[in-house]
Every structure is written in C-alpha cells, then in structure tokens.
Amino acid sequence: MIKKILYILVTVGLHSSVLAQHFPVYNQHFINSNLYNPADFGRNDYTQVFGFFRQQWSDIQNAPQTQFLTIDGPVNDRAGAGIILINDSENIVSRTTFMGTFSYSVPLAEGHDISFGISFGVLQNRIDFDKVNSRQKQFDNAILDGRENKTAAEGSAGISYKFKKLRAGFGAHDLLASRFDYENNDGTESVSFDLVRQYIVSASYLFDVYPKITVQPKLLVRATQGLPSQVEGNVLFTYDKDLWLGVTYRQANNWAASLGTFVYDKITIGYSYEMNMGNFGDYSGGSHEFIIGYRFGKKLQSQKPMVVELPIIDQKDYTKDFKVQEEKMDQLAQQVDRLESQLRQGAAMSEYEQQEIENLQKIIAEQRFNTLRLIERTSIDTEIEDFVHSNALYYVVVGSFQDLKHAKNYQKLLIRNHDLQTKVVQNKEQTHYLIYTLSSKKKEVLIQGLQDVIALESFLIEGQPWIYKYD
C-alpha cells in the first residue's frame, strides 16, 4: 500500500518534475547556460558567479522550488573549471547536488571551435514522509515516517560547438541513474526512488539587426528516458549589449517573458515570469525566477600568433599601403617606449599607467599583421564607392581589438591624451571591436573625419585610420 501512496503523490504532485524538472528547468539559460551544458564552463575571458532562484506555480502549496549557484572561469586559453550547487525541492522530495566541472576547448579555425565538459560530484536525495497526508497513517504503523536522506554519486557531460554566430550544444545529466531505497524501521515496507537520465540539445544563431540591436533565436529540446520529449523555443533581443528581453514558449502551453541588464560590464540582473495558458494555469499561478551574476578577473591572453587567411579580392594593389602601415606600427611601438621612459624619468608613473603601457605594447605585437589584414578586407576607396545609392553605414575607424575590454581601455587613452571621443561597434563577423570617431553616409563628412584623425598624428592610433563599411 505504501508504494501505491507514494506513487500517487509523486505522479500527481510531481508529474511536472518527472517530465521536465527532474533536472531543473529555467528560462534564463541564454544568460547562463552552465547548468545545462558543462562544456560552456570557463569559455569567457573572465570569472563569473551566478545565483538563481525559481518559484514554480506560486498559488500551489509545496510547488517546485529551485536555487542554484555556479562559479566558473578560465584556467588557460583552452581549459575552464567551476562548481555547481543545486537545491531542488518538489512536494515531499528534495535534493541537493554539488559538482565540480572541467571543460576543454579545441580551436578549429578563427571563430570556430568545439568544447567538451564533464561534471562529477555528489547528490543527496531527501523524502519527507511526514508531509504525506493519508488517513491510513492513523491505523498503519508500518507506513514510513520522518525524513529519509540518501546520498549517491552524480555526473553530467556535454559538448558545445561554435561557428561564428552559430551555437549548438548537447548535455547529458544524471548519467549514473542513481537509485535510492527507503525502508521503515521493521523492514516490512520499502520505497524506491530512481533518477533517470536526461538529455538537452540546443542550437541558436545571433542576427545583427542594427549596430546596437541583436536578435538570437534558440531551440532547446529536453529528452528524459521513458518520457516524451519537450521542445522549447526562445528569442532573445539585446540592445547595446546592456539590456535584454527574452520570450520563451515551452510545450504544455507555457509562456515566459524575461528582462534583464548588465551593469558596468560587471553585474548581471535578470527576472523571468512564466505562465501556463491552459486549464492548469487557472489555479496554479505563475512562476517567478531571478538571476544575478558578477564578473571579475581576466582570462590569460594566448601567446600563440593568430593565423589569418588572406581573402582573394579584386581590388587595388595594397603593397604600398602595407609598407605604410608597417612603418606606422613601428613608430607606434617606438613612441610607446619613449612615453614609458619619460614617465619613469619623472617618477610619476602610477601602477595603473604602467600596466596600460605594458598591455598596449603586447597588443601592438599581437595585432600587427592582423590589423593590416583587417584594413585590407574592410576599408573602402572613397573615390569609387557609390555613397548615393548605398544603404550601408560608414565608420571612421581608428583602432580594432578582439577584446572589448582592450577597446574600452583604448578609448580612455584617446580621451586622456587627445580629448578624442569615440564609440565602439562590432564588425559583421563579430571577430573585432572597432573604435570609431564618427559614422555617416555622406562622403564629405567621412573624408573630413578621416583627415581630422590623421591630423592628430597620435602615437595611439593603430596604423592608418580607415573607413569601414557596415552593410
């Protein structure tokens, strides 16, 4: 009889958990996907901490509730590591999971790589039989009571694929499929609780709608052994990399809206509200989730030179331009050395300024040829460009970096040394951050802007400024 009672409780009270929340379901995985795929750990150029809380079905007593904490960061250019702590409660059943995670990325080409990740740790499963509301407990002393705890090993694994703006991933969870057995004191009654493996497949693509606006649709499929698969669709709208709005549809007629922001490039704050549009939603209430994250630290920069394939183009001969660019880059390096020497002689160089100079020297060395090739690929000839009939937007570019933080530091140097106000835009391939002084569709404005920058004769300008076409 006890098996039947628990089966009814779990099947009726926790049917959502068995189907979709056996491994926690949450809407804001587009902000932090670590929980769903261990291969995503440590892939950013910073260490990050995320805390999360979700209350499902707010109008139902003892409805599912989830909290988790993830910490991850880079070990080196290819490896990442982190930890996961999950607390999940659903009616009379709750569990706490703690795992360590390691990931490794294999670069295939520029903007093209594949990563592998594995998590391993322990899981404690708890059943609170005192919450069982049954008249039979008044007459049957053999029924289980109290709070029973069982512990077992837990593991997950994942693969993540990246090709320019395309992302795809596969995660497998509860790999060990642990079994928990509970007995009453005299051993006459027992209950078994089995974890089943769950697989999560996802794919997304980032579209640039406008220089500051992106749209990223994402498809996610959850498959649990012995149960129907569940399909989920998401669309994420981002403005200026600071604000986002997400819309989610999940099978079983669930809709969710998410809203969040990045504060000072350090703090992430997000909220999501989910509702069931079917009959169940009339009395279940909505679901709420909150996420907050903090970024700190910095990934070590690769010491290996970047390999860039030169495109085959039918344009003017750039041989002379290359020589001019190389001379400019050499002059830049020499002037940075002189600046460093002058600051040291005056005994006035702060630790921050010294670090800026050293970072700038490294960037110059790493990006010498990469910058030249970027100019060759993206610059236009103002004499032959058809500005009148073009729908493109043009930028007067003074520098390019693959790291956003380098680009922002470069902006600060331009303001401090020349009072030159600049902005940042990402190129279409999303491989570089371009620092520009102005944008326009008018030839005269662009040429004048280019001449103004050249007239500065600044040692901070990376080679010859150029006009970039964004179409």
Image (cartoon, rainbow, N blue to C red):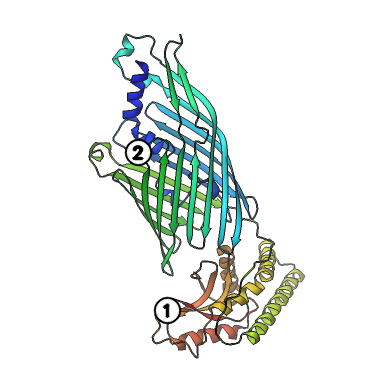
Position of 236 with respect to 383 (left or right) is: left
- Inspect the image, locate mark 1, and give the three-letter code of the amino acid beneath it: Ala
**Image coords of residue 432 (percent x, y):** 55, 68
Amino acid at circle 2: Gln
Residue 428 location (% of width, % of height)? 48, 70
- Residue 272 appears left or right of 37: left
367 versus 281 height, above or below: below
Give how far across and how far down residue 451 sits, in percent: 55, 87
Q: How many marks?
A: 2
Q: Please state the horizontal and vertical placement of residue 39, each as a whole percent of the image.
A: 55, 48
Which residue is located at x 51 percent, y 63 percent?
A: 164
Q: Residue furthest right?
A: 345
Label annotation for residue 297: none
Q: Which mark is residue 392?
A: 1
Q: Residue at x 56, y 54 (%)?
A: 114
Please determine whether, in this image, residue 61 is positioned above or below residue 428. above
Give the Cα separation between the discs numbered 2 and 1. 47 Å
Residue 151 drawn above or below residue 254 = above
Q: Residues within 10 Å of mark 1 (few under 14, many from 20)?
A: few
Residue 461 appears anywhere in the view: no
Marking on residue 56: 2
Above or below: residue 224 compared with residue 317: above
Q: Earlier in the sequence, mark 2 or mark 1?
A: 2
Crowd rating for badge 2 (residues with CA inside 10 Å; few <14, some 14–19, many 20+):
many
Q: Quadrant of residue 119?
A: top right
Toward the front, the furthest residue is 226
